[in-house]
Image: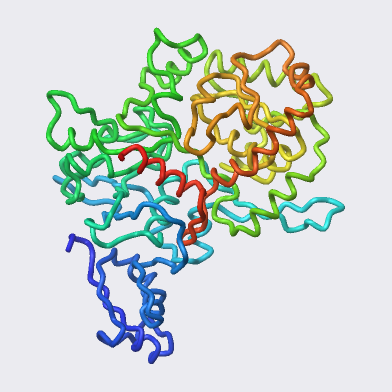
Amino acid sequence: MANGFRLCTLSALAWAAAGGSTTALAGPGAFAEDFACDAEYCHNNFVQVAVNRAAGRKTHAGQTPTSAPSGPSIYVYEVPSRMVYKGVEVMFRNDTCLETAPIGSQEEVECLFGATVELGESGSDRTHLRFHDVEQWSLGRIFLRSLQRHPRRVSKPEDADLFFIPQFNYLVHTPQDKCPPAELLMQQLPFLNQETAPRHIWLTQTTAWTNCTCMEFNSAASSDASEATAVLAKTTKLALEDRESAPQSAESLNPLDKLIKMAYHGESPPVAENLHSIPYASMLSGLDAETVAAWQEFTAEVQRPFLASALWGVHGITHTFAVRMELMSQCSRSANCSFTDLDAFSSSLGFRDTFSDETMREKSRSTFCLEPIGDTTSRKGLVDSIMAGCIPVLFSPLQAKLWPWHVGRWEDVAIVLEEVPSDVMAVLAKVPDEEIARLRSNLPAVARRLSFSPPGQPRAEDALEITLHGVLATVK
């Protein structure tokens, strides 16, 4: 058994005899089963597992019994979040809230998806429309907990179609001295080798630009690479941007994208091999199907007094800043466009990181949502717009290459422009009603594909299932 883990022995009969007391568990009973897990994780899960055993249900630690959509089986490595290696503390991930939040608790929900927001509509009986104020760098926590509790999680590596490596960074700018070296990673992943490497998946919660990831995530199978580095190079990686959607070389970039590359002071766009682009978690993530349906009914029927809305912080670098300023100016000159400066709005609220209530309120009042790029190609506003039933307007061809597994053709849900027109409002006013209806009719299905289900309750074609099927298709 790996260091730092313990064997938890559960007895449903002993637990029941103790009246549900977690302190009165006896030894193994008729329904007991031993399994290895992280000590804290074990502590938070043993009651549910004991109940499952008593009912004769075969589940993994912390996993909620449920009927699961068909798909690949997943083996999740049990790796500590941090350890001391050669006298230096290295961090496999920063998931403090997951380590302390009891399974199934409101604390766990908020750790994964943020606080629940209720958006009442004046003059309507819809006073309890709910969504989550999800934080934009949350993918690592969501993937880890969702796969830990997934009904298709397996305990034997020989039964696995895919393997999940729970190593991810929370910080946008990752300190390399805190990253686990390739050799240490390999020690923690005993079933990773040249043959199984493509079926091993891990992710970065950000864009995969080189200053946002550990060097090992960007391992390349060069002739001088170590054996560990060469194996890691063959693994499958996930990030908000990949090598198709992010700029790659100065020779192939238009002036806008050249300046994006300069934004990170010489740092490179994604270089990881076998890298795939996956979306930000949406505000509907972590909600039950009924709540999602109620929200989508609202977005289909709500009156939209504005032709367009624009919500962003007035920042960026050189050309991208100029693009945002130009679009802000165009929007502000039109009575048919609503502009919100998110930087100023955040300042007025004490520099809150998220303000989904304001975002969804404004976007749900508009037919089109302007979505210029900022520091890099991806932005969470693209996902927010789709959730609000607002047709995104893209201003760079690179944006149309984001998240192909989940979105498909952006031309089916968005207006795709290659540059900023002199009068964007005039361009949008000329979009035929039939085209608006076509684009909006496609938004609800894509919204569901961009949303993560509550842990342990996967739904067919949710964001996690789409990702797992996409990975399996590439490795096959």
Task: Give the total of numbered labels.
Answer: 0
Q: Where does the C terminus fall, quadrant-wise?
A: top left
Q: Is residue 4 left or right of residue 293?
A: left
**Most foreground residue, 206 or 473:** 473
Left of 406 or right of it: where is 6? left
Residue 291's x, y, as percent? 65, 57
**Quarter the N terminus occupies:** bottom left
x, y percentage for residue 112?
49, 53
Residue 212 % position (x, y): 37, 32
Outermost residue to the bottom: 17
Q: Residue at x 36, y 79 (%)?
A: 53
Q: In which quarter of the image is residue 180?
A: top left
Q: In which quarter of the image is residue 445?
A: top right
Name the residue located 30 percent from the left edge and 29 percent from the top edge.
Answer: 273
- At horizontal 33% and vertical 43% (from top left) the residue drawn is 202
**As drawn, 154 above or below 412:** below
Q: In this view, does 91 lie to the left or right of 278?
A: left
Task: In the rendered view, tell whether residue 67 sits above or below residue 157.
Answer: below
